[in-house]
Amino acid sequence: MSRLLSVNSCNLDGFEGLHRAIQGTHVDVMQLGRGKFRGSLTHLGIGDFSLSIGSFSVGVRTQRAPSDDKLVIGMLLSAKDRVTHWSFDMRPGDVLVMPPNTEHDGSFHGASAYAAIRLDLADVASVFRGEPRLSDLASWRDKNHFRSDSVIGLAATRRLPLIASCLWEQQATLSDAAADFWKRSIVDALTGTILHSLPPDTGGPLPSAMRLVREVENYLNSVGARPVHISEICAVFNVSRRSLHRAFYDVLGLGPVTFLRHKRLCAVHSALRESAPAEVTVAEVAMQHGFIELGRFSRYYRLLFGEYPSETLGIHNTAAAPDVVAALQERRLG
């Protein structure tokens, strides 16, 4: 018997492209870091087994709704700055476990790359057969973070992109034996860190700060596109500006005023990308999202995205898909 191998790759020229950061999962994304966004995504499938590899050039905030019924196991491949998931501070080689139907939030403070597999809990016993600790369903029902051993973690961060690159070149139907071998190779790269993990650090954001930031973000999502002032946030959550600033800075590395402005700028960016110059003007879209001083808005926009809003307007992502894994390898070896 045989199984179809599929590898799909694309380049990204905006943070919006990370919405499908992991095959089959919708992730809400917001750009945090300043500069022109550049990224890449590769989704590799062997039957119903999938591996996703992504990279991006500036800091982003990612959130997954608790409606995904799959288990996601991810590894941080590289990071130029701090990376946090929930209250875990992560280093390259670390592994993160996202159980089914669990919300997730992560903050990447700079350029980063990751890898992740996504599978059914029912498949855990067969995927991790031979390892009693890993084949037990109870091991995967709680969110968790595994700190990598430096040698094992470094080897895994190199191994996963190399596997994806090799399979990209084949783009063929695999025998059952070959499919099983490559699945085991991918899984072993991730589980090596889990089985030989070091004690986790305790220097991540405080749970209370994470909870406040999450509640504020949920509130912002509930009001939709309406611009929200910082004083409204303080009143709704009965918190001082100082306490709010401390929580946001601990979790995201920037204050709440800057966060609110970035969130509105990201909404403007998405609206401009989806519009045609004949339909709207930059001024109309900016004012709808709470920007009145257009000169200042334009400066903020260019600082965050590396281009003027007029350059974004009417641009649609029609670029052909290049070999993303090769780009990942080139960046890693450079």
Image (cartoon, rainbow, N blue to C red):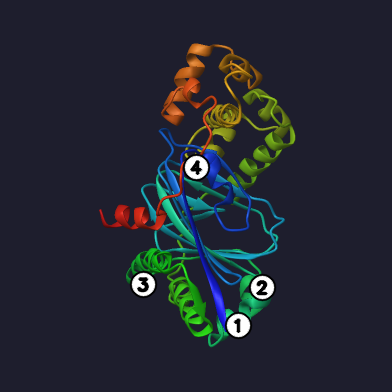
- The type of residue carrying mark 1 is Ser
Q: Residues within 10 Å of mark 3 (few under 14, many from 20)?
A: some
User: Comparing marks 1 and 3, which lies closer to the viewer?
Assistant: 1
Q: Which residue is mark 4?
A: 60
Instruction: Judge whether 119 appears above or below 65 on screen.
Output: below
Q: Residues within 10 Å of mark 4 (few under 14, many from 20)?
A: many
- The type of residue carrying mark 4 is Val
Q: Which residue is mark 2?
A: 121
User: Element at badge 4?
Assistant: strand
Q: Earlier in the sequence, mark 4 or mark 2?
A: 4
Q: Earlier in the sequence, mark 2 or mark 1?
A: 2
Q: Which mark is residue 208?
A: none
Q: Quadrant of the N terminus?
A: bottom right
Q: Earlier in the sequence, mark 3 or mark 4?
A: 4
User: Element at badge 1?
Assistant: helix
Q: Earlier in the sequence, mark 1 or mark 4?
A: 4
Residue at horizontal 45 percent and vertical 30 percent from the top: 305
Q: Which residue is mark 3?
A: 152
State the image coordinates of residue 135 (x, y, percent, origin top left): 60, 81
Residue at horizontal 70 percent and vertical 63 percent from the top: 69
- The type of residue carrying mark 2 is Leu
Q: Which residue is mark 1?
A: 126
Tell me: 269 left or right of 64.
left
